Amino acid sequence: MQDALSTTFAALADPTRRAILARLSSGESSVSDLAKPFAMSAPAITKHLKVLQRAGLISQGRQAQWRPCKLEAQPLREAADWVAQYRQHWEDRLDRLEDYLATLQAPSTEEKP
Amino acid sequence: MTAHAPFTISRWLKAPRPLVWEVYSSPEHLQHWLGPKGSTVTHSQLDFQVGGTYHYAMKVEGGMELWGKWLFLELQAPEKLVLIQCFSDPQGGATRNPWAAGWPMYTHSTTTLTEQDGGTLMTLVWAPHEATAEEEALFAASHDSMRQGWGGNLDVLEDYLSLLQTA
């Protein structure tokens, strides 16, 4: 029942996780550096990272000793597209309503549906 | 009750309030404006009264046909319209959002019409109805978290996303 979009939004629903993503948008970071600004235990941060990782929003390097975390843009982009569409859906409907009301009030139009 | 802020949108319309009300109250009128541009309403069956329903289908760009249903909870001509809406099948049964299964099955919308500056101000307030906490969170994340909850961080992410799109 969990589709990709729902998983992404569930991951984004938490302010700490959003802060982590914002932090990663300026570049890769080690887990310990990521944890620094938060008044949170290391296991708590790790838990948040796991949620982000499962949602495909971040990935963690394998080679380097410090295993840097990296932002993965694709799911975020899909979420952003969804949000844009969502508002657009209503804007479109209102545009159409506006046009239709104009048609109904146009003096030259005899059309009375 | 939802803990999240509902989605709201308003638009000033250059039309007298009774006319705006009228275009909601007949299936022929609804057919003319309900779908987004480029879509065609292919089914429009309306029982405009409290407890009545509106069952519709629209063909959107790309050929996909979407069915939906409204249930009218409150109709106060010409100023207030409250309804529950859901995606549906051709028989009128409620279905899940075809794009996001975690979306609330039912949503609740209140449309208010106010006379203003020689026209009508329409305000729509949209919120989940009888949804689970997860569904409410998804609904909210689709507008307020992304817009407000991100706070100052949103700009950074937006810049980053636009950078990726141009790359």
Image (cartoon, coloured by chain):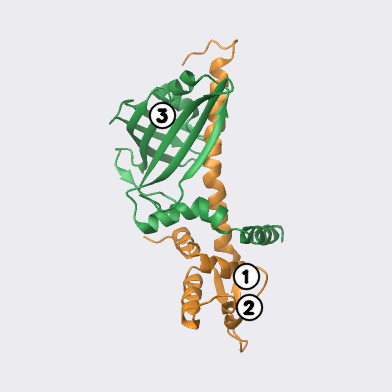
Query: Disc 3 residue type?
Result: Lys
Relative to the observer, which residue lies in front, B166 or A37? Answer: A37
The residue lying at 48 percent from left, 13 percent from top is A112
Q: Are marks 2 and 1 in contact (CB under 8 Å)?
A: yes
Label 2 and label 1: CA atoms lie apart by 8 Å
Q: Vertical placement of A65 versus B120: above or below?
A: below
Spot the residue most to the bottom. Answer: A65
Say which mark, if any, is on residue A29.
Answer: 2
Disc 1 target residue: A23
Q: Quadrant of the C terminus of chain B?
A: bottom right
The residue lying at 56 percent from left, 42 percent from top is A88
Tell me where residue B159 appears, x and y as whole percent.
Answer: 68, 59
Say which mark, if any, is on residue A70.
Answer: none
Q: Is residue B101 visible?
A: no
Disc 3 target residue: B80
Asked if marks 2 and 3 fall on the same chain, the answer is no
Which of the chains bears the disc numbered 2? A
Chain B shown in which color? green
Relative to the observer, which residue lies in front, B79 or A6? Answer: B79
The residue tagged with tag 3: helix, strand or loop?
strand
The residue lying at 45 percent from left, 27 percent from top is B31
Tell me where residue B107 appears, x and y as whole percent.
Answer: 38, 44
